[in-house]
Amino acid sequence: MILTDFPYTKDYRSLNNNPARYARLDKRLEELSGELMPLRIAILSSYTADGLRPFLRVELARRGLLATLSVMPFGQFEELILDPASLLYREDPDVVVILTRPEEMAADGTGQVQDDLLNANVARTRLWIENIRHFSDAQILVSSQSISTPSLWHISDVMDCHSGPELMVAQANRQLATICGTVSDCYLFDSDAVIKTTGLQEWSDEKMYYLGRIPHSTTAKIALSNALARHVSALRTLPKKCLVLDADNTLWGGVIGEDGLGGIRLGGAWPGNAFQNFQRYILRLREKGVILALCSKNNKEDVETVFSDHEDCLLKLEHFGAIRANWNDKASNITELAEELNIGVDSMVFVDDSPVECGWVRENLPQVTVVQLPSSPLAYIATVEAFEAFDILRLTQEDKHRANQYGEERQRKVARSEAKSLEDFLYSLEMKSQIEPVSPSSLARAVQLIHKTNQFNLTLHRHSEAELCSLMNNGAVALTLRLQDKFGDSGIVGLAIGVPNDDSFSQSRECRWHIDTFLLSCRVLGRGVEDLLLASLANYIEKRLAEDSPLILIGEFKSGKKNSQVADFYPNRDFEAVDGEKGFWVRNLSKAPLEIPAWFDLE
């Protein structure tokens, strides 16, 4: 996400695509070594990519990352990937970026890109990815295929249904996306979209390519660096969870309390159609898992009338996870919205057209990302997008369903208020749970939980996909918990990882297991789900042991900024403190087994 308080914001805005200014700013970045997150990046390319260095470092710094870049020699990048003792792996990068062009990798003797050669290059790329994953835990970004040399396009290409460049590139990129989806922590970087957005004529510098295999113009280097930095940032930082929206002059033009339902501008002709398109964009964010909330200084009945009765209003009341339409100050309302949604204010993005309201929220809730909209609704979407607050490289099924889950949760709250007792309520939910080992289909969600869960997270370990796969390959048990009830499917909401043969506290190794990770989504707490997951982990481990072997389970708690509520999790379940080891707790399950709460139907 773009840093709004980047120390060199003024300098950055004055860059105007000037490479000398980028270079000067790049040299000053070391002054921020204590403020930015360090990151090691290796770049492998089929052309000379050293010129990206100052642009990419500055763009990464704007997103909170201080990069050490290792640009590998372009003529040797394939050998570096295949050799486990090469400089690539000795550098131990956090992220590996692969940048290739079909012009170098899939062209025949005449310089034309050929379909069979492009397919062969996709197969080679698979080999590169698999080798990097085998020798390194680095996250991998692979550029999509795109022909960026203008002279290789011809006016007749659009009519070539069999081997036209667009068709060839699209097929190759579909294959690459499939390959990346099957390898842990590997993602496709859509360089083709960057080239099209920038413009093919603006992209290439043919003279520099002939002189030094440098294909990019200055404009291209900046555009490519900006897009790469955005992708890397999405790999290393968490997206925001909630979009908090003003109503008047944000979701529609005008003021509903003054103009009335027929007087506001929404749909139809300009400018109402621009506001309606902004609503379409908001709905697309919701489909990607962004929670919507409304925060408006208005009479609630007036606002609700727009959503229910205006024929051109695409947003409806059910699309919002929570609503505050009153005359209270917006900082207080946002705080209440966060409490109702059970999320932190630091995961919220507030969007408003009023500089007064935006200033008030910035001053009173500095953790909230504040987006002040411009005067014209034409720029609304671009303004929100510029913050990159909701960037995510891989969506899970839980992401797609998340927005609907808040409506389901409201139904549960009604049922709880009507139940005679907590136990009656829990039985009435008709909860069904699935406890399963982490699989290729659930791996992305498991890692997402690891990185996003802060409150009910006992160890705060932040394993990558590659690290989690390594743990499992070395004998660890990693279980996901999926929960559904009569109101809906909550998806995968829990993860527990047990690691065998922990000998930190005893010479007896065969039956001691250490709980490396134990976490749950906060929206399912209060139903005994934590006891279900803990008992299931123990049961699963016991099935691996000899019949008469006792299981010694060792729990760990690491204190963080937001997980104080689970500090007593283990002692409250009769685990005993380990002498001389602060934060560790132990329980002999042969003497005191764990039980699954009776109201769960465990599949």
Image: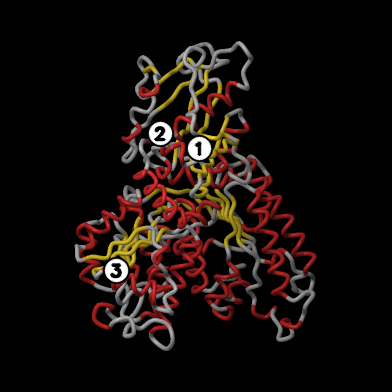
Q: Residue at x 67, y 80 (%)?
A: 151
Q: Nearer the viewer, mark 3 or mark 1?
A: 1
Q: Nearer the viewer, mark 1 or mark 2?
A: 2
Which of 478/343 is in front?
A: 343
Estimate the spatial distance between the alpha carbons at disc 1 and disc 2, rounded to whole Å. 25 Å
Q: Residue 376 is drawn in which quadrant?
A: bottom left
Mark 2 lies on residue = 423
Which of 261/100 is in front?
A: 261
Q: Horizontal and vertical percent for residue 69?
A: 49, 53
- Residue flagged by tag 1: what amino acid is it? Leu
| Quadrant assignment for the C terminus | top right
Whichever of labels 3 and 1 marks the residue nearer the N terminus, that label is 3
Mark 3 lies on residue = 10
- Residue flagged by tag 3: what amino acid is it? Lys
Give SS at disc 3.
Answer: helix
Q: Residue at x 52, y 51 (%)?
A: 398
Q: Is residue 327 left or right of residue 503?
A: left
Which of 598/545 is in front?
A: 598
Can residue 26 be seen in this snapshot?
no
Mark 1 lies on residue = 495
